[in-house]
Amino acid sequence: MANLHDIRRRIKSVKNTAQITRAMQLVAASKMKRAQDAALASLPYAELLARILAPISKGVVNFSHPFLEAGRSNKRCIILLSTDRGLCGALNANLFRVLPDRAQEVKYITVGRKAAQFISRTQRILVADFILPDAFKISEARKVIDFAIQAFEDGSIGSVDVLYPRFVNTLRQVPELVPLLPLAGISKVLESLGVEKETQDDRELNFEPSAEVILTNLLPLYVRRQFYAMVRTAKASEHSARMVAMKTATDNANNLADSLTLDYNKARQAAITQEILEIAAATAANEN
């Protein structure tokens, strides 16, 4: 059995670790709440976009847009949303398992250091990497999606998908691969925005300059809004996973500290018993 000094040192080290993980748990919980609120704050924008798109789409016939057509290239691009730091459980590992095999020629745009490191380490094609802070602005997220849109319009890639951890609840984050470009059609766009919940408007509307021009300008807004919502969801998933991981680490550290304290008490009791036996033996020897 280890001596008392070593056990005391281990107990102190474990308790210090528990304090650190507990602090990280509280910070992650606070950031998770802010990320969830930010994700919910974008819903009114989606509802407004749906109210605008619904009547416009009814008055447009034979509408064509680059976002609705197959890309000129057969090369696929995946925007991979990961974390910048670790200590978030298996969040990143679960994402990377969903990636296509390296034999497939897929280009990657990464958001987060962990994704960039994994793509480089596995020798996949990395065309760009971005870093978004926790409190990022929509202009910062727009740089990422605009880079992908430009590549799609130039013809260097034929499709754009987004792989991100979808927030289900505090304990569950599911990797989800979502096609972003080309769009499946106006009806799918309206369905994703929840337009079926909107009140039907039977009024005859006139659009200036024209419904086609307005729709042409609204589709990029829709794509950017979808990507922004995915990034917000990924941030909420990151902080949730980190909070759960740090809580588990704190609980394990407390359990280990309790176990070491029990060992310490046993060792101390054994040392006291040994001293009593030695005193009793010495007293008996003197009496004899």
Image (cartoon, rainbow, N blue to C red):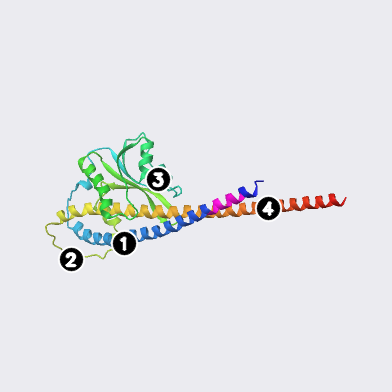
Expressed as whole percent of the image width and height from the top left, the position of residue 201 reads: 22, 65
Which badge, 4 or 1, comes first in the chain's sequence? 1
Expressed as whole percent of the image width and height from the top left, the position of residue 280 reads: 80, 53
Q: Which mark is residue 203?
A: 2
Q: As displayed, is residue 223 above or below residue 203?
A: above
Residue 1 vs residue 278: left or right? left
Residue designated by label 3 = 95
Q: Give how far apart the Cα atoms at labels 1 and 2 are.
A: 30 Å
Q: Give how far apart the Cα atoms at labels 2 and 4 are.
A: 86 Å
Q: Amino acid at mark 1?
A: Ala
Please report the residue visible at 20 percent of the width from the left and 56 percent of the height from the top: 57
Residue designated by label 1 = 41
**Cβ–Cβ under 8 Å for marks 3 and 4:** no
* Magenta segment main secondary structure: helix
Q: Amino acid at mark 3?
A: Leu
Q: Which mark is residue 268?
A: 4
Please report the residue visible at 68 percent of the width from the left and 51 percent of the height from the top: 267
Say if residue 172 shows up in the picture. Answer: no
Comparing 281 with 64, the one in front is 281
